[in-house]
Structure formats: structure tokens, C-alpha cells
Image (cartoon, helix red, strand yellow):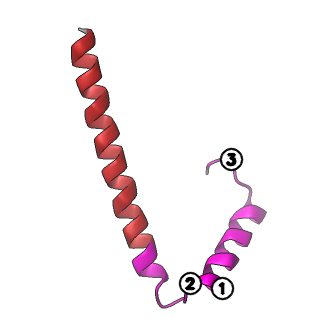
Amino acid sequence: MFGLGMGEILIIGTVLILVIRPKDLPKVFRGLGRAYGEIRRFTSSFMRHINTLDS
């Protein structure tokens, strides 16, 4: 996943738990997932548009 090893993922997870309250983590991850989905949809739409211009 993004070239990260298990040690790095554990460190990131520990920092997240220390910075963000564990109760709020699901909300944060849900927001990140939605943002990631929107970015993927935008880039997919953009690439389709570019490919139609190429043809």
C-alpha cells in the first residue's frame, strides 16, 4: 500500500490515535474515503474527456 511497510503503517496508526480521539476516527476515515472517491471520479471523468479529444 503506497510502498509503506507494516512498521510505517503501525506508526501512522499510533500517531492518528494520539492526535485524533479514537471515537472520531470512523468519521475521519469516512470523510477521507469520500474525498478519495470524489477524486477518483473526477480523474476518471477527466481522462475520458481527454481520450475523446484524442480520437
For the stretch drawn in magenta, what is the main secondary structure?
Answer: helix
Element at label 2: loop
* Residue positioned 36% across, 59% down in the render: 35
* Whether residue 9 is situated above or below residue 38 in the rendered picture: below
> What residue do we see at 62% from left, 77% from top?
16
> Mark 2 is on which residue type?
Ile
In the displayed structure, 44 sits above or below 51; it is: below
Q: Secondary structure at mark 3?
A: loop
Q: In the rendered image, which residue does mark 1 sit on?
A: 18
Which residue corresponds to the image point at 62% horizontal and 83% vertical from the top-left? 19
Q: Is residue 35 above or below residue 49?
A: below
Measured as percent of width and height from the top left, residue 51 is found at 28, 18
Residue wearing tag 3: 3
Tell me the amino acid under the disc marked 1.
Leu
Residue furthest top as drawn: 55
- Please tell me which of labels 1 and 3 falls first in the chain: 3
Q: How many marks?
A: 3
Residue of label 2:
20
Residue extending furthest toward the right: 7
Of the 4 image quadrants, the one containing the C terminus is top left
**Which secondary structure lies at badge 1?**
helix
Name above or below for residue 21 compared with residue 37.
below
First-in-chain label (3 vs 2): 3
Q: Picture coordinates of residue 39 (x, y %)?
A: 36, 48
